[in-house]
Amino acid sequence: MWFSLLSLVLGTALAGSLLAWLASNSGPVVSLRKIAKSAPGNSDDAPPPVQRLIEVVNQTLPQTQCAQCGHPGCRPYAEAIINQNAPINQCPPGGQSLIDELAELLGRESVPLDTSRGDNKPAQVAYIDESLCIGCTLCIDACPVDAIVGASRQMHTIITDQCTGCELCLPPCPVDCISLEPASRTLDQWRWPKPVISKRS
Amino acid sequence: MALAQASHIQTFMNWLRELLTGDGRTLKIRGGLTLPRNKPGLPVDNNIVSLNVPEHIVIPLLDYHHKPVTPCVRTGQSVSTGDKLAPGIIASTGGTVLTIEDRPVIHPSSLLAPCVVIATRSEQINQQPVHCALDVPSIARIALCGVRGLGGAGFATATKLERSAPLGQPIDTLIINAVECEPGISCDESLLICEATSVVRAMIVMMELTACKRCVLAIENDKLLALAALKQAMQQLSTLSKNIDVQLLAPIYPSGAERPLIERVTHIRLQEGRRPVDQGVVCINVATALAASQAQEGYPLVSRIITVAGEQAVNAVNVRVLFGTPVRNVLEQTGNLQNIKLSRVRVGGPLSGFDLNNLDTPVTATTNCISIEAPLVTNSPDPCIRCDACSEVCPVDLLPQQLYWYAQQDDLDKSTHYGLNQCIECGCCDVVCPSRIPLTQTFRYARSALQEQTQAKQRATDAEQRYQLREQRLSAKAAASEAQRKMAKTTLTQGNDPIAAALARAKQRRNNPDSDNPA
């Protein structure tokens, strides 16, 4: 008697799991429960070591290495922000979005960009007018990311892909043959425009 | 052993599911739309018309990611059909390179891209068989012949097959995709009807090439003429084609999209970021398979079939067009150029395509359809009423309304979390949305924003690395010169000062003029 009962229960369980397996084939890729469970939230750990914090701030900075912030590069600025409590609004290439991001990251107040350091400009790239270049190598020494190739008394040129548009090559050039132009948009960098939705009253 | 057992269980389960669901061999994708098939402006017959070679052809120098590639030909150079113009790009006909300059290309932006312009020779050259090296391995032959995916994405077929057997991952299932689900496109259907025997032969070649266990031709169940032609061809080649299954699919858009199709045919759900080949599946468009098999005999891929159709098309027809032919020329030769200014020319189907801004753009491997539609009247969208119709039709099981919420707020992290990268941009959600919200457009925007963010991050990392290396180099240099100075100083202070020694020698000479000669 109990044997038949047991076999009935087992058989039902087996059939149930089979049906469940069949149904699971059409389950959603992103199930709501999964999203709710793994919703991104900041896990408040113990305060990270200073070095790691500097690393995080450095990764947030745009790495233009333009020194407009008054520090010789992005990493020194990150170190100053953490170690010397330097203001977070000194980076013109990062602009307001960087300030907001840093403010959220460090728990400081978001302030407007300090425009005495410079204005936030769209992405730009340096160009050397090769007919004017005399090959003095002064710009090569000035470039913080080694994006200029050339040799003494040979024409110089900019590796466009590696230029950060920091403008540091402009002052040393004795013949003013370097100009900054807006970074050209090639097809692989093109992005779809955001649909404009007019608000209805 | 365990694997073999698992595959037996899989087969049994498939059989059981078919038995339970009762729809036999016709598969249905999840979600999707049943769209009207016989709307006005479709080709009346299934003939393929060959067009004349235009005076000039324009070949864009762009790779799969639309990144410019460096040409390996010069202005004035003579080229013949199948010659390499740049890595991965071949000349579609013989002639002289007229110029290499920036020209408009088929792309949703109106940006220019570097192109090779070839003045074609007056005599017909593209008919003659070709010289592509036959002594290279079969996959390299496909690469040499410039075969790319003709289904829509244009991915290099050789790259796709490289990762499969015999070198890489063994292939379980080869899916030949003849599901042309977007209404209005019939180039693959006409190819099947006109060249069924070559298609079946091509499938046999592809089976050998990928060393797959099973080959499935996926096709919709309402393409009766194509099915009849296929059946006849398979009967003719019955000894060779016995391992080919024909898998019928319900005519639902977008059954032909790679991921939903693979999931339906093999019951394998691909995880995000994984390629089908990682799971032992290769999915190839039917025309691509034909091109790849022709590449085995040394014929390069230089043309494709394009459906010219649309509501305002004067003469809807399937045409075989040489790559690099300007769209204007295609329309002119098919007699569709009059009154074109009043219409909207769309490339790549009514749902998944985009409007073309310039008719002088050249046809490429991904141009499957040119449709001539009436100008669009857009009403501004209403707010979302949370009807959930978009989630019901989504073939990859996303939640478009949630995704839209985050995408339009530029919250890319949350968008990624809600599967932004899995969106196949099929446009089903746009069609059903009662508020006319531009969902797909927003997802495209968010996706390209995400791509740009990744690119910017990569550039920043590179710049940082270069900055660090420069700092290291400069500090090493400074340290070296400091060390040199220090050494000079110690030499001076330790008494073996060369200047003092010279002075002493001079003094000695002055005192002792006779011993002037040290020798």
Image: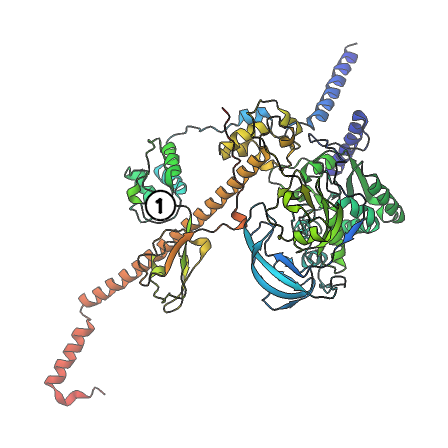
* Front in this rendered view, residue B437 or B356: B356
State which quarter of the image contains the C terminus of chain B.
bottom left
Left or right side of A184 for A14 = right
Place residue B132 in its image quadrant.
bottom right
For badge 1, the amino acid type reads Arg
Left or right side of B305 for B464 = left
* Front in this rendered view, residue B252 or B44: B44
Question: x and y percent of residue B330 in the render?
Answer: 70, 52
* Front in this rendered view, residue B462 or B235: B235
Q: Can see residue B363?
A: no
Tell me the chain of label 1. A
Determine crowd level at label 1: few under 14, some 14-19, many 20+ residues with C-alpha closer than 10 A. many
In the picture shown, does residue B137 fall above or below A49?
below
* Front in this rendered view, residue A46 or B28: B28
Residue that lies at the very extreme toward the left in this rendered image: B511
Q: Can see residue B406?
A: yes
